[in-house]
Structures are given as structure tokens and as C-alpha cells.
Amino acid sequence: MNAVSILEVAKKAGVSIATASRVISKANYPVSASTRQKVMEAAATLNYAPNALARGMKTRRSNLIAVLVNDNTDPYFAEIMSGVEEVANEQGYLTIICNTNREPTKELHYLQTLRDYRADGLIFAGSGFGLPTYSQRLEEVIQVLREQGTAVVTLSQHSLQVPSVQADNFGGALQMTKRLLELGHRLIAFVTGPANLAVANVRLQGYMMALTEAGIMISPQLLLTGDFTLKGGEQAVQGLNYLPSPERPTAIFAGNDETALGVLSGLRRLGWQVPADVSVCGFGDIPLAQVMVPSLTTVHIDLRDLGRKGVFKLLSQLGHEEVANLEVMPTTVIERESTTTFSIAS
Amino acid sequence: MNAVSILEVAKKAGVSIATASRVISKANYPVSASTRQKVMEAAATLNYAPNALARGMKTRRSNLIAVLVNDNTDPYFAEIMSGVEEVANEQGYLTIICNTNREPTKELHYLQTLRDYRADGLIFAGSGFGLPTYSQRLEEVIQVLREQGTAVVTLSQHSLQVPSVQADNFGGALQMTKRLLELGHRLIAFVTGPANLAVANVRLQGYMMALTEAGIMISPQLLLTGDFTLKGGEQAVQGLNYLPSPERPTAIFAGNDETALGVLSGLRRLGWQVPADVSVCGFGDIPLAQVMVPSLTTVHIDLRDLGRKGVFKLLSQLGHEEVANLEVMPTTVIERESTTTFSIAS
DNA sequence: GCAGCTTTAGACATCGTTTTCTAAATGTTG
DNA sequence: CAACATTTAGAAAACGATGTCTAAAGCTGC
């Protein structure tokens, strides 16, 4: 039942535990080729597995990193996680998944546990909850963690003052909206996300900026409330039927892809054809976007790469390198079947 | 930079580290109310966080559990993972995610690392790769892990001889096929999964059993090869156009939901109407299934619950309880818009 | 008032590593 | 060949907890 320890390896090899440790841990310390060989063989025949807990205790490095997401089931986060896991694995780290479910208490509890485990790094994939009373508490805990030597990175707009790598949400929304304008659309609706979600608002900002730059008034009745879910998208468009025809949007820009899918399904129930009657686009470019019928025009974010970059930023911090406070990842507009030109004639 | 240890807490409280440990670890050992109070206060003012690595080393329990999946991005696994994370968190465990990407070497490497960390439990969410040379190697490693005290559970058909909780894939496929027969279909195609994937084959068995029970010959040209991906589903149906009309299937049963989505999109490109020209159904009931247009008839598996049950089974093993070798979770046919009756008249 | 319990606290060994410090063996130089 | 570097190996002290074993009090009861 009990695993073999380095002591037994040392005995079998006829050396001290010090030298055994030196060859096992690949320490930068000279060991003659012959003794090294003996230790390796002993370890192999005993099927030795070094105790990572003991090692971590001594080296003050757990080689554990955690990724905090709202919900690992959300393709957005799933994609990021897979990038995180990929490079964590390459670099010899284990990835711990923490679903916060948007519950401050669950998040705080996880942070406490991660502190107990002396996690080397934390990645906040989702944005904060925005509750001021809570975010102060969060701020404190993070402060303590960082003093303890834990590296922290956010992958989205966040109240935390820590290094961050973020997709260019503003720029993406700006570009997409400009493109819709180019296509001739003037009545462009936007489906928002949860009011307290920073990303959602930044995208909204980009949309509004494009309109103002083009000298177009932002019509409140074209600001549809969504919540970044499928259901939310479906419901958001239900009201459009009640608008008099000339006021109806000719394009709908959904704050994220899930919402866009909901919008598509909602419109179909309304009997509106996409893109014939109305163009639809999203934000995120989840894998499904390109296989939908019609396939979805959207803003592409390389989420896996975002996850990867996040881990690299963590590792840089752990290596005591100087690290840029904010790194922006470009986003690109991908045009598919769900959008088309609009001209008054049509 | 260095975290405070229990020694400093003990000093501050004016007690020995033994008593400090006893109140911190909530050990079952009498400590007077007044000293307990002193220790709690000292811990609070010092903002003490017990070192889980040190604790784990002593107690021989890491409170880490790992879930091994092919790809956390796959909604099937994502759902299971979320169930795992949920109860792991409730029960005071941290969840480590391991994407194997169907690479034996990556899986083996993870198992080695998990052994190093003295993980308390492992959950195999996906099925094995079926390579005999590899599965023997796997068998050995698992054997060692279990002897070491690590609990192991599989959530699918697997070559490993360990406790398992599984969805009733056979029964689900059987029921679904029977239902299609009830609806009047006689030419029912089945889109397979990867040949070496056990679940895929079990579902195929269920389909074939239903047909043989009904006295219907299984036509090889209605066995379409897929690979459990969207693209695979799209491609699988391309050949159907070349079949003479009377031999064309009136229903297509896809081995999983992703494939079904691919099938839907493939059929649309072919110009076939669903369900008017052909009924389509899947297996799994991923969240998307009900918002598709048409919404997808499928076999529902409560994957989150599968994950939850998996963890409970792990914990039972860790508590040295007797554990059933195989626990089967029922599946249910959910009828939505993508299937309808068929009669020769139509 | 004393033998014998029960309750509570402390000293110390221990878990399995890494790492510093010391020392032996070997190699180099004049 | 003496004197001194350079390699290589070992002894022992951490790291931060838990848990056993021992002992000091505080209570019984006779």
C-alpha cells in the first residue's frame, strides 16, 4: 500500500539519499556517470515515483496552476481552458479547474483552498462580478496570494490590478460594426450581455463608437437586452415584431456567439429569413459558428491562444521577469453566410 | 514573501504547535474552549493558511482528484467535468483536468504525474484507445496506482477492470431504434463512431439488436461511417444522394449528437428536408440539441449526474466501502422536431 | 488525604524530499 | 612530492504539518 521512498532507492543503489535525490530531481550537481546509472536502475526496478507533495514543500513550488472560470461547460471558457492545459502540461504543471458559477463565495472559497495548496499561479478567465463589497474582499485575497509568491493573470477586463492578456473586444466590435455599415446597414441592433459583465460592455462601446464615428444616432429601441445565453438571444428578438417595419433593424449584432445562435433561432420562429430579411453576427467564433446553417459571421478570437499566452505570462512572472501589464490580442472579423449587403432598394 | 506557518500561530497564541494543529485541523481531540479561542484568533490575525502540501504528506491524502478526458472542449466531456467539479468541491477536493487528446503517451505521462502527486482518485471519462500494446501498459500503471491507495473509476466502457458507472448506451440505442420502428421507419441508417471507440460500438449493437428483433435485415449501405465529429456527420451523408430513391433511408440515427448536427447540416446542403424527407436523431442530448432548428430528437444522458456519481464512487472507495463493480445509469429517448412518422403513402 | 481517573497540554518523531555544509578522493601544478 | 584545486559523495538540517506518547492538572470516591 505504501509507496517506495527515495530512501529505499538510495539503499538499493548503495548510495546516500542525497545523491539519490540529485539524480532523481535532475539537480544541477555533479554525479558520476556510474553512480547515476546505479540510482536510475534502482529507481526503475522499485518503480519509484517521487512524492510531489514532499518536493513541493521543500522547493516552495507546487507546480500547480488553477484556472478560474464561470462554467467550464461554456465553450468560451472550455476553449481557453484547453489552451491553458496544453502549455501547462508541456511545462510540467498540473491544471486545476475552478468553476465559480458566478458565486462570489465559491470563488473566495476556491482562492482560500488554492492558497492552502500553494498554487504557483492563478488564471482568471472570466471577468469579475462587479459587486463592490465583494471585489474589495477579492482584491485583498489576491494581494495576499501575490505576496506569498503566487503569480496571477487575468484574461479579461477585471477590477484586479494584475498582469493581463486580453482579446481586443473593443476593436473587434468596432470593426464588425464598421463592416456592417460598409454593407449598407443603417439600422443595426445590438444584443447586450449581463449588465455587470465588463466584456459585454466593452463590446457595446465598440459598437457605439462605430456608429457615432459614422454620425448615426444610437437608437435605444435597437439596444436589445440579452444575457450571453442562447435563451437570452431567443428572447431578445421577440419584441422586434412589434416595431413598425421602417424601424426594424436590418442587421443584428449579438454580444457573443451563443446569443447569436439564440437570435437565429428566435428569428426563425418569427419567420424572418437570415440573411435575406436581416443580417446577424456574433462575437467569439465558437466552433459551431461555421457549421450552423446559415454559418455565422462573427469576430474571431483565438481563445486557445489566449489561454496559452496566459500561462506563459504566469511563467514569466514566476521566473521573476518583467512583465507587461496589459497585452492585447488582435481579433478579426470573419464573414460567413449570416450577413449580406443591404440597400434601400431591396 | 514566505507564508506564516503553524509554528508562528502557536507562538502568538502561547501554545505548543501540537495544540495549534489540533484546533486548525479540526482534529478529534479535546482542546479547551479558551485555548481554542486563542489559537483561532492568532490564526486570524496572522492570516494563516495551512500548507496543504505538508498536511497531505503527513496524512497521505492529497485531496486531489483528476478527471481524464479526451478533450475538455467536447461538450460531452465538459458536462461530465462540471458534475465532477461540483461534488469534488462540495467534498473538499480539488479537480485536476487532464486532456489526453487520444494520445496514449500523453495519458501515460499524466498518470505518472498524478502518481507523483499522490492523487486520491482518478476518473476516466472517455473510453480507452483500444491499442492492445498500449492498454496493457495502462493496465499496469493503474494496478500500481490502486495498490498505492488511489481510487479509480471509469465512466464508460473501458478495458480497465475498475469500478464503473455508465450510461445505458445499449439500452438507449435499442429504445431509440424501436421508437423509429414504431414511427413506421424501415430503412434506418446508423452513423458510426470511431471504430476503436467502445461506446460507439455499444450503441451500434443496440441499433442492430432492435432491427434483428424486428426481423429486419441490416443493410450495409445504411451503415455510414462517422467519427463522432461535426465534419464526420456532414461527410457521412454525402453518399446518400447516389442511392436509388427506394433504397434511401427514411431515418438516420447518428451515434452521437455532434454527428447528428453534422448530419443535419449535410442534409441541408443536399437539399433534403428534415423531418419531411428524412428523420434524424442523435445520442447524448447536448444542450444545443433543443435549440437547433429543427430541435433534435435524441437519447438523453444526464452527464453532469454521471460525473457526480463518479466522484461519489471514488469517495466510497476511499472510505473503504464495498463498491458495486458496475452501476448503470438509465437513458431516455427525447422526441423533438427532427423525427416524425413515416408511411409508405407519403 | 490519597489512590485512581479523566481531561488537556507539550515534546518529539515522523512524513519524503532538497540543500547546505563538510569531507574524502582525485587531479593538477611547480 | 608537497601543496592546492577540483570532483564527487555523505550527514544532517530543514520544509510544515500530524499524531503518538508522556505528563501535569483537576476530579472522583473512600
Image (cartoon, coloured by chain):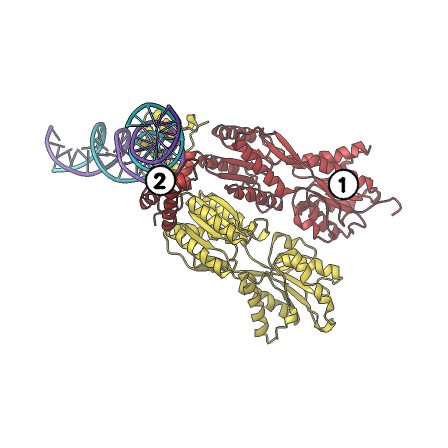
Chain colours: A yellow, B red, C cyan, D purple
Q: In the image, what residue type sits under mark 2? A: Lys
Q: Secondary structure at mark 2?
A: helix
To the question of a shared chain for discs 1 and 2, the answer is: no
B88 and A186: which is toward the camera: B88
**Count of numbered marks:** 2
| Tag shown at residue B189 | 1
Mark 1: give few (<14), some (14-19) or many (20+) Cα within 10 Å: many
Q: CA distance from mark 1 to mark 2?
A: 60 Å
Left or right of residue B223, residue A54 in this image? left
Left or right of residue A161, residue A231 in this image? right
Q: Is residue A281 above or below residue B48?
A: below
Residue B15, image x, y percentages: 32, 41
Chain of the residue under label 2: A
Quadrant assignment, res A195: bottom right
**Residue located beneath label 2 in the image:** A58
A67 and A342: which is toward the camera: A67
Does the image show residue A184? Answer: no
Q: Secondary structure at mark 1?
A: strand
Chain of the residue under label 1: B
